[in-house]
């Protein structure tokens, strides 16, 4: 492998173009079930057709697109939503207590 070929293959990686055994640009698919549900992987474009070279490779975390990040953020937000609700409830209680304290101070000043 020459150094020029190496640098061009690096460019291919940057463009998310992974080549399968047929030397074709891979299709990116998403795992539908199992522990890796939602995780994306590269497959031969002849996937489920004749000529499938059985190429398989997980999409590297470094290759995550904005869409992937969006789904990850949504998933973690849903996980934190209940926790966030509790914090909001707590803040409301603190605000009510502060308001009551202010009213009491105000009434003491008026006396
Ligand atoms: Zn292939």
Image (spheres, helix red, strand yellow):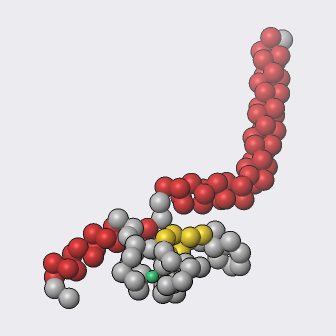
Q: Is residue 72 visible?
A: yes
Say which residue appears at 23% left-offset and 73% top-offset. 8
Q: Nearer the viewer, residue 99 or 87?
A: 87
Q: Nearer the viewer, residue 79 or 99?
A: 79
Say which residue appears at 48% left-offset and 74% top-offset. 45
Say which quarter of the image contains residue 17.
bottom left
Quarter holding the N terminus is: bottom left
Judge left or right: residue 97 versus residue 56.
right
Judge left or right: residue 55 versus residue 6.
right
State which image quarter holds ligand 1.
bottom left
- Residue 111 x %, y %: 84, 11
Say which residue appears at 39% left-offset and 67% top-offset. 16
Say which quarter of the image contains residue 38.
bottom right
- Residue 20 x %, y %: 42, 81
Above or below, comparing residue 39 to residue 1 in the picture: above
Q: Nearer the viewer, residue 27 or 107?
A: 27
- Residue 36 x %, y %: 64, 76
């Amino acid at each position: 492998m020459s150094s020029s070929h190496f640098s061009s293959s690096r460019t291919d990686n940057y463009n998310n173009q992974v080549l399968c055994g047929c030397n074709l640009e891979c299709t990116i698919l998403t795992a539908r079930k199992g522990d890796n549900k939602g995780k994306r992987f590269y497959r031969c474009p002849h996937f489920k057709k004749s000529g499938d070279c059985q190429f398989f490779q997980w999409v590297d975390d470094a290759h995550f697109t904005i869409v992937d990040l969006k789904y990850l953020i949504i998933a973690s937000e849903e996980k934190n939503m209940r926790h966030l609700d509790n914090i909001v409830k707590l803040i409301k209680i603190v605000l009510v207590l502060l308001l009551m304290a202010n009213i009491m101070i105000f009434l003491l000043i008026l006396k």
